[in-house]
Image (cartoon, rainbow, N blue to C red):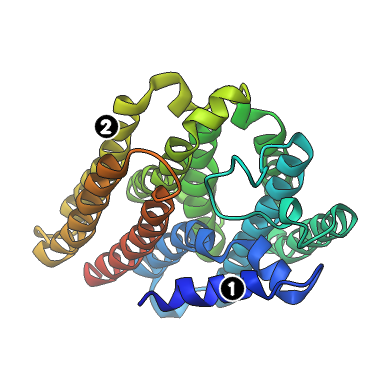
Amino acid sequence: MNIKKDILTKMEADVKVNSLNAWILAARPKTLTGASVPVMIGIAFAFFNVGWSQFRILPAVLSVLFAYIMQIDANFVNDYYDCLKGNDKSETRLGPSRACSEGWITLPAMRKGILITTVLACIVGLPLIYYGGWEMIIIGLFCVVFCFLYTTKLSYLGLGDLLVLIFFGIVPVCLTYYVISPEGNINNITWQVFTASIACGFIIDTLLVVNNYRDRDNDKQANKNTLIVRIGEKKAEDLYFLLGALGVCLMAIVFFFTADTMNILSISLLFIYTLLHIKTWKEMKKIKKGKELNKVLGLTARNILVYGVLTTIGILLIK
């Protein structure tokens, strides 16, 4: 029995308009692994380099909160605009139900929700100026702007995967490390941190790939030219596998060259994720089409979290 699935099904059955249950479903809890993993890795590297004596706890907490709120904000924006465009019609939708299209949350209420989460993210991120300098304002504005541009424009141009690499890999990992570390110099971001940020972006992009793989036919009809629509089914399956493999290889390189000697245990941890990734990839190829691919989406979200936890442990082990 899948307890989480049963709980979610019961929540969907009991949804009242604009209720707490409706907002929880609209926040898409499964996607929050994509927000937590890069911050976890950035925090781990900061601790690895400075230890407890110079580790700054408050910016670490603020980074986590900002990441979660921005992810929820992005989900609200996606829910709202896809409803307006008619992309979430129940009769054709293959993915999980969406709050606005199902009538769980009204459009005026969702506009207020988007405003609240956007403002809240700005409030939470504002103190990071003290730790990272005024550049944090520019970075924060980019996060907010691209949060809106992704759903309204860029996802239709096949740029979603690039945005994942930037805003779920390079930006959160490097900047979390930057604001927590006491040096206060962007040049102090090490090659290990930057490489790990790219690896993280590749791993998290597997979630977008399987999502767009499931929706490829509907997206093509809606003139939503995602990368998966452009490259086709077979290459999409290859891409899913390759992203996971690259994420593992890059992190293994970091572990190999960071420790004084080859850290077998840290590298070995990555094989746990590798086995899960391969198993999920095979399941994806077996299912091919339809709503059953939502199972693969859930497994991919789990794999991402496992990768984040194992990578974090691996970083701390080489201390």
Image height of 309 relative to 185, above or below:
below
Residue bearing the label numbered 2:
238
Can you give x and y, in whole percent of width and height, for residue 304 in the image?
37, 57
**Lateral position of residue 18 relative to residue 282, left or right:** right
Amino acid at the residue labelled 2: Asp
Label 1 belongs to which residue? Answer: 61
Relative to the observer, which residue lies in front, 101 or 166?
101
Q: Position of residue 170 (x, y in %)?
A: 48, 44
- Can residue 159 be spotted in the picture? no
Q: Residues within 10 Å of mark 1 (few under 14, many from 20)?
A: some
Q: What secondary structure is marked by label 2? A: helix
Give the residue type that dot 1 points to.
Answer: Val
Quarter of the image for the N terminus: give it: bottom left
Residue 241 - label:
none
Which residue shows up at 55% across the image and 71% down it?
9
Q: Is residue 45 left or right of residue 19?
A: left
Residue 116 rendering spot, x and y as whole percentages: 83, 62
Closest to the camera, between mark 2 and mark 1, is: 2
